[in-house]
Image (spheres, rainbow, N blue to C red):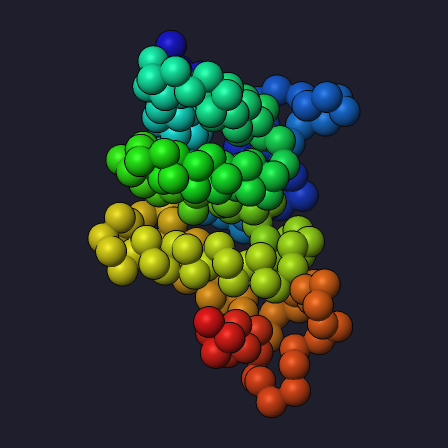
């Protein structure tokens, strides 16, 4: 049986992809509206692929939790499950990444290199869940800061360079979209440490690239 995640409806001469079920506020979630039905179908396909990817990530995290539990590291096992539960209910992804990063470092210190690397490789996808996955486009939301956009773009770029994603993937197209936003001077909220693009830099991409 196919899990119905979203559907396409026509609103005011636009083709909109909306959630199949109402959220807690009683509204259908909007995944984006498009000028033609083909683009809406493409977006719907991305959402289904994204949900499948989430299921894969949750499975990897559950197996990792079982593995460390068998080795007697109960507190780490519980921490991994806690992160997985937050992903499943689409909680704050920033907190998830911070928590998972601490787990990765802890596993590395304990000599669990394979598990550490396995969980670390999930971070780029987890970062993208809220901003790039099942919600309106970043251009419509315009709610995350420039430094966070760069961090996501950089992680996806690095992932592409080592061959973990290819040019036909959703992540690659998202990487290009984020880079374009940063390079074109698209209006993004500034990081907490500065009010606007620092003097001497044309755009956020140039600034963050030189800061690395």
**Image quarter (top left, top right, bottom left or bottom right) of the N terminus:** top left
Image vertical order of residue 152 relative to residue 127, above or below: below
Question: Is 158 displayed left or right of 183 in the figure?
Answer: left
Image label count: 0
Seen as rendered, the residue at the extreme left is 163
Residue 113: x and y in percent read 29, 38
On the question of residue 16 being in view, the answer is no
Q: Residue at x 27, y 35 (%)?
A: 114
Residue 3: x and y in percent read 44, 17
Seen as rendered, the residue at the extreme bottom is 200
Residue 31: x and y in percent read 57, 39
Q: Residue at x 52, y 25 (%)?
A: 79
**Image quarter of residue 60:** top left
Q: Residue at x 65, y 87 (%)?
A: 199
**Image quarter of residue 198:** bottom right
Of residues 206 and 10, the one drawn nearer to the viewer in this rendering: 206
**Image quarter of residue 122:** top left
Image vertical order of residue 184 relative to residue 94, above or below: below
Question: Is 104 displayed left or right of 186 in the figure?
Answer: left
Seen as rendered, the residue at the extreme top is 1
Q: Residue at x 32, y 40 (%)?
A: 117
Of residues 39 and 178, the one drawn nearer to the viewer in this rendering: 178
On the question of residue 56 being in view, the answer is yes
């Amino acid at each position: 049986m196919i899990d119905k995640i979203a559907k396409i409806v026509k609103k005011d001469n636009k083709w909109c992809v909306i959630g199949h079920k109402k959220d807690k506020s009683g509204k259908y979630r909007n995944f984006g509206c498009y000028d033609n039905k083909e683009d809406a179908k493409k977006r719907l396909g991305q959402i289904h692929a994204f949900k499948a990817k989430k299921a894969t990530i949750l499975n990897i995290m559950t197996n990792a939790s079982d593995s460390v539990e068998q080795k007697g590291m109960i507190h780490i096992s519980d921490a991994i499950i806690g992160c997985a539960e937050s992903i499943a209910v689409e909680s704050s992804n920033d907190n998830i990444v911070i928590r998972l990063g601490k787990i990765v470092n802890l596993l590395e210190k304990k000599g669990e290199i394979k598990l550490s690397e396995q969980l670390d490789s999930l971070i780029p996808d987890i970062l993208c869940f809220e901003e790039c996955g099942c919600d309106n486009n970043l251009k419509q939301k315009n709610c995350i800061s420039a430094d966070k956009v760069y961090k996501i773009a950089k992680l996806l770029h690095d992932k592409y360079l080592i061959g973990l994603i290819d040019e036909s993937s959703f992540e690659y197209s998202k990487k290009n979209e984020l880079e374009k936003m940063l390079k074109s001077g698209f209006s993004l909220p500034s990081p907490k440490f500065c009010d606007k693009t620092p003097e001497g830099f044309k755009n956020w991409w140039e600034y963050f690239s030189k800061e690395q």
